[in-house]
Amino acid sequence: MVHLSWYLTVSAILFCIGVFGFLTRRNIIMMLLSIELMLNSVNLNLAAISHYMEDLRGQVLVFFIIAVAAAEAAIGLGIVVTLFRHRKSIHTDQIVSLKG
Amino acid sequence: MLSLLPETTLAAAALFFFFKNLELFKLESKKAVLLFGLAAASASVIGLFFHGEFFNGAYRVDNFSRFFTLLISFAYMIACIIFTRLKECDQSRVDEFFFFTSMAALGLVMAVGSVELMSMFIALEVSSYPMYIITTFRKGLGRQFEASVKYIIFGAVSTALMLYGISYIYGLSGSTFLVDIASTLPPKLGNPMAALGVLLFMGGLGYKLAAFPFHFWAPDVYSGAASEVTTFIAALPKITATALLIRIAHLFTGIEIVPLTISVLAVLSMTAGNLMALGQTGLKRLLAYSAVSHAGFILVGLIALGNGGAQAAMFYASVYALMSLAAFMVAVEASGRDPVDIPIERLKGLWRKSPVMAVMLTIALASLAGLPPTAGFAGKLFLLISAWKAGFEWVVIAGVINTFIGIYYYLKVIKTCLVSDGRENGFAPAPFYLKAASVVMAATMILLGIFPNTLLDMAGSAFRALVM
Amino acid sequence: MADYLYLIPLFPLIGFLINGLVGKRIGKPMVSMIGCLSVGSAFLVSLLSFNELLQLDPHQRQLVNHLWTWMSVGAFKVEVNFLLDQLSGVMILVVTGVGFLIHIYSTGYMHEDESYWRYFAYLNMFVFFMCCLVLGANYLVMFVGWEGVGLASYLLIGFWYKGMENAEAGKKAFIVNRIGDFGFALGMFLMFWTFGSLSYLEVFPKALHLFEQGHLLLNAPVVVAICLLLFVGATGKSAQIPLYVWLPDAMAGPTPVSALIHAATMVTAGVYMVARSNILYTLAPTASLVVALVAAATALFAATIGILQNDIKKVLAYSTVSQLGYMFIGVGVTAYWAGIFHLMTHAFFKACLFLCSGSVIHAMGGDQDMRNMGGLAKKMPITYVTMLLATLAIAGLPPLAGFFSKDEILWKAFTYPYFPAMGKIIWFMGTLGAGITAFYMFRLIFMTFHGDFRGTPEQAHHLHESPPSMTVPLIILAALSVVGGWIGIPHLIGHALNHHSPVPNLFETFLEPVFEHSEHIVSTKGMIHHYPAWLEWSLMGLSVAVALGGIAMAFHIYIRRFHELPARLAKQYAIHYQLVYNKYYVDEIYYYMFVLPIYYLSVFLWKVVDVLCIDKIGVNGPGWLVKRVSAGTSLIHDGYMQTYGAYMLLGLVAILAFFLGYR
């Protein structure tokens, strides 16, 4: 049996990759993807913990997170699309008019 | 089912506007929104008297949650009054707008009642998504999409961080119910994973409160979104964030490091917010930074929960919501012609054109600045006294210094609206009900400063419900 | 009993609300009626309640009007109470009485202003907050008034907002007062922490009790700290070194405002506060000494600057700063009643002086430069006579009001029981300041009213005496400046006047119950020396002589030699030759000994200390800070999401490190 800490480590690595991607990618879609990665690391965490503790609540939470993440992606992409229509760009370098 | 009346009312409002959007009703939207605002406020008053537990104990209706429900519903009502003006929003999407705001208010109310992390999270998301969407509802080609993107991206990141925290909290305590967490987690706080879990979770709430260093979205979203939208975003989520932070911080009473960390954040937040607000020339941006500073003040209450800090924070959150709604009511009146933010100069001559509005704005800003005898003064005093009693003298000194820095830029705005040099900007005369509302709000801000005890006692009994 | 004390602030509040909300529509006569009537009614109620106070036994003279419990959080309980005792009684009469006169005067002075109603609304608001400040029975209510009068003052300084200078002046007043208020607020917190209350009727007995039980030593650090912090607040509000800078600039506001707020009432709030907290200050002799020394320095310093000002209101402003210094000397050397006495007489003669200057400015069509005036005595006889009387009073000539109060303060400084040696120094500075005061005040009189008119022909044509609404208050105030001091005649003179039944010092006797505990502490802990009567007589004579000397010098320079001097005062060598030519060897000595050093000192203080240090650094500093900070803000908030995200996560990591690292 794989020990819980392995899952948690993998998930932490996934989360860090997500954070790293969020901080370095300039494309908003890629940033959203990085966020998905972070959310999936959470899912991995929850599923592993749930399995380890033999408590189903964690896995139920995973379903919720998947659903919520889907909704978030839908809204996020919708907004990105409208932004793209107006600015012809989804690079964070181009959307810096609100500042100061 | 009277104990779920406030939630039901808000859900009904949301449903109504959803179907209204499909052109099923003929009622005029702006009348309907006023009606629902009033209904929600009355429902929350009735709701005060009914308590209960729902969804296997995940949702608890008690004095604590009903106190905040009351605040959110009244804030929603005032927001609805302001929404009837809709100056910067796309008029063709008015029903959608009302649908989303009702949904967001519902989510905020649900979050306050949740005593389980999962439902708390879902409720918060229910409140967030509509706010991301309405941020784009501005007329013309403003900066609304940029604002919305920034809002949702940082919202999503903070959600991810918060969930990551929840996963650790769940792992260490074996439960998502706050009751269980309260008994199992605090002793483990020396464990870095527990600390990370709690901090990430509170960080997510800090994002909702726009506390330093989670505030970066606020100025951009405030200035990019339509003024009506900003009104909503500035006032309502803060109430819920305060409630949840009190809930969470209360779990860790007696652990020295938690209040200490919060106190550092509180001071940083009020100082950073204030300093950044100093140089602002746009009204909405100024209010955004000042909101950061006020978030710091609300956090002060959390470091002294048992010493009256909780009551003080609750009092301050309610007063802050009121002051911010009042300030934004005027901002909405002044808005409509600027590509991005409302320049403070636009308020010039407000005194002549609309004395009632000018008086209310003056009182609201004086209250935000914490000048006696307004409610803001009483609130700040309570917060600082509780901190002093809890032994955080340095926080008090920082708070007093910050209050005096804050007065500087608030008075600058007051001065602008009392000044007129002949070249005034035409303000459309406000309708009667708006004037009446502003008189009532101005009076409330003064009365809460002179007689703060009623609200404070209510907050006290609400907090006792949490302790028990 | 005294359930009607709340009416005193209520009337001005109603006036403020009516004038502020509908003043624009009801027309000027109605606005002035409401404005004056509200303050007049407040004055009447004050008189009534004062009368009720007099009916009581001297030691029972405390009327408390409980209104409501403002806030109670655990042990922190603040009630909104009004307290009328001898001290607040005197203050409230001064505030509402002088306030009433100035409201009447304003109806004449402001009658052409387009924002007439706004002016009266602000003025009523000021009176309301001032009444709260004076009547409040605890420090928090006082603080409410304290902040409120600051706001009113800020609004009124910037009343004519079209001039940029006015806005700057308002800003300056504002920033400086915030520094003071910061000290005041911290002092309150410390007081609450120490004594568990903010109410006068609880804090003072408790402090006294702790002291008598030996739990609180004389000069206990915490009490000294409280007193010093409160005094920081007082230096802001009452324009003492180093926070006095806003007051001269505050003259940008309308002249009646200068008279009411920046001379007679608001700026004396600090003195009132110290006198009110007399027990604390008596228990903290070090703090008292600081008060007295700062005050003496201010009294001399501001008087010196006053010599060179050419703006008639600026002269009066510096003179106000200087006179406030005398009041603080009084309360600093534990002669609380003398400080309050000078506060009262000063309210009369300084309000009179300001209103007279307003009358002059009115006649001059807004010109405030004394170099353009001259010979106005013939055109404006009432203004001249009233101003002359008030000037004689401020110069400290017997038997006018200023003599009794100022002399009492100087005598008390000379006999300072806690620090006798320091007392002598303070006395010397005060006496010197008195001479300078006489000099520059008579310089003002001579330059304004004597000699030939130096303005433009239009101005000369326009010169006229002011309307009765303006002159009647002048006459009343001038009369008070003459007789106001007679209620506080020193025992020495009282005995001399009538050996068998000495003329009593009514004022001291009246206020005694408020200060008796302090006096008791001073008499047991201080070093009371008994000074012979001839010493007091000679000091009295000396101060009169100094005042006369100042007047004589002013007369000499500005009347007899005026045509030679203005241009050449700056070129002192020319004066030197002139003097030798005229064989005024005495003058030469005078010049080298007094005039030139003081002239240079004055230039130095004004140009270097005042303008350079305090203006540039103290007031423009915040502006610089704002620029820096907003540059920093736009650096952090540069619009890039990556930047935001990086700061956010960095912050999170820092918090985590703090959280885990702390142990």
Image (cartoon, grey):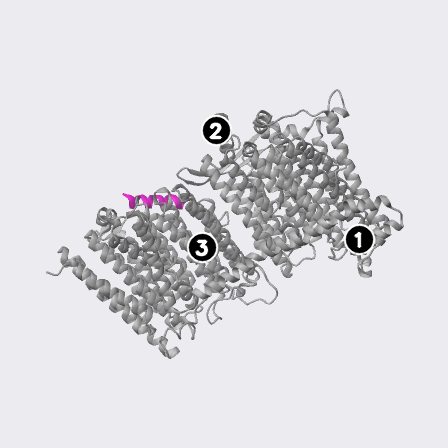
Callouts 2 and 3 in the same chain = no
Q: Is residue B162 visible?
A: yes
The quarter in which the C terminus of chain B is drawn is: top left
The residue that disc 1 covers is: C572
Callouts 1 and 3 in the same chain = no
- Tell me the kind of residue under disc 3: Thr
Q: Is residue B334 left or right of residue C663?
A: right
Does C301 appear in magenta? no
**From the viewer's perspective, is residue C119 above or below residue C332?**
below
Chain letter belonging to callout 1:
C
Residue C210, position in %: x, y? Answer: 48, 28
| Alpha-carbon span between mark 1 and mark 3 | 53 Å
- Tell me the kind of residue under disc 2: Leu
Does B455 appear in magenta? yes
The residue that disc 2 covers is: C210
Chain letter belonging to callout 2:
C
